[in-house]
Image (cartoon, helix red, strand yellow):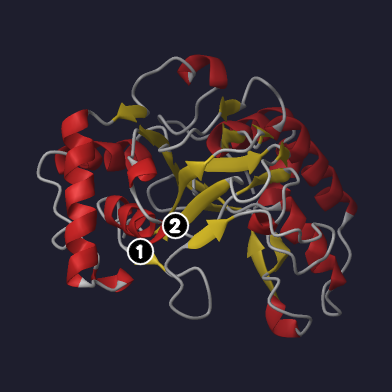
Amino acid sequence: MAIAQVLGPGQWLAAEIRDSHTWRVALNEEHRHEVLGAVRAAETAGLAPQEITPDGFPLPRLGPLLRRVREEIVDGHGFALLQGVPVGQMSERQREIAGLGLGCHIGPIVSQGPGPVPLVHVRDTGADPSQPRTRSYQHNGPLGYHSDPTDVVALLCVRPAKSGGLSVIVSSAAVHNEVVRTRPDLAEVLYQPWWHDRRTGDGPDSFYTKPLCTLGQDGRVSFSYGPDYLRSAQRGACVPPFTPAQREAMDLLDRLTNDPRFVLTMDLREGDMQFLNNHVVLHGRTAYEDHPKPERRHLIRLWFTTG
């Protein structure tokens, strides 16, 4: 199987894009007033999460700007940062509505659990990251580069950490191309089945196979990677050990995703809302030190589809 490099705006290096304004969108006072009004109207109407749609969360002035944000996420560099969401003027419930309301202009909401879980609060719960069923949003340790299992992931920052907790992203297309260029033998391994862990239990339903890379009909490569979940899949009775080639491929991906040539760092501040296209961007997080309770690091995570 001959693997080719992929082209397009989704493959970028950090130096090429770090100072670009295409992925930064700052809300002005009019936009913030409009968001607050839409949040209060949705709260008063008692809308359920599935009822928060662009029609139910109208943003006549900000909406056209969010459509351009969607274009940047889907057909551009694969990520965007919305700045200035007035979370400091909202209750916790209103912040949830704001995240869902802004996000629904990017795409329909996707559940994050076996039931209708429209969002997740990302806080350090003291969970042990070494335990195979611990979720990545439950502790303050570093997160390896990964993609979430949906088209778009969004993080709305309510409160940053005392220190650390930086968001780091890389173009998975650029990483893919570097593997193809330097180790075409390992590029083939990325397209073979790998065992992944859902971390839903210890039975066979928690484990499934999927290639790390798939090629769409449009010629784009979609990267599905999460080293922590690949490694924890090794606990499955039905899961064979990594092959030497798989271990070498993971070592190479870990080196490339931590190479400064590829890494773009974002220090998310209060009111920042980050959107990432999981097909073309891998993301991680540095470890962080928290404030004392109750002023602890707090983000709201949402998943969306663009279909």
Q: Position of residue 306 (x, y in %)?
A: 33, 56
Q: Position of residue 150 (x, y in %)?
A: 47, 59
Secondary structure of the residue carrying numbered label 1:
strand
In the picture, measured across the screen, residue 212 lies left or right of residue 14, that is right
In the picture, measured across the screen, residue 116 lies left or right of residue 285, that is left
Q: Tell me which residue sits at (37%, 61%) in the image.
A: 93
Q: Nearer the viewer, residue 270 or 80?
A: 270
Q: Tell me which residue sits at (32%, 59%) in the image.
A: 97
Secondary structure of the residue carrying numbered label 2:
strand
Among the 4 quarters of the image, the one containing residue 33: top left
Q: Quadrant of the C terminus?
A: bottom left
**Relative vertical location of residue 299 with respect to residue 11 in this rendering, above or below:** below
Number of dots carrying numbers: 2
Give the spatial CA distance, label 2 vs label 1: 8 Å
Label 1: how many Cα within 10 Å (few below 14, some 14–19, many 20+)? many
Among the 4 quarters of the image, the one containing residue 136: bottom right
Q: Tell me which residue sits at (73%, 38%) in the image.
A: 289
**Which three-letter amino acid code belongs to the residue tagged 1?**
Ile
Q: Nearer the viewer, residue 19 or 156?
A: 156
Which mark identifies residue 19?
Answer: none
**Relative vertical location of residue 60 with respect to residue 50 in this rendering, above or below:** above
Q: Tell me which residue sits at (52%, 42%) in the image.
A: 159
Q: Which residue carries the number 2 mark?
A: 302
Q: Nearer the viewer, residue 258 or 208?
A: 258
Q: Position of residue 18 (x, y in %)?
A: 49, 18
Look at the numbered discs 2 and 1 and tell me whether their residues touch, using CB distance below 8 Å: yes
Label 2 vs 1, first from the N-terminus: 1
Label 2: how many Cα within 10 Å (few below 14, some 14–19, many 20+)? many
Q: Which residue carries the number 1 mark?
A: 109
In the picture, measured across the screen, residue 141 lies left or right of residue 178, that is right
**Which three-letter amino acid code belongs to the residue tagged 2?**
Leu
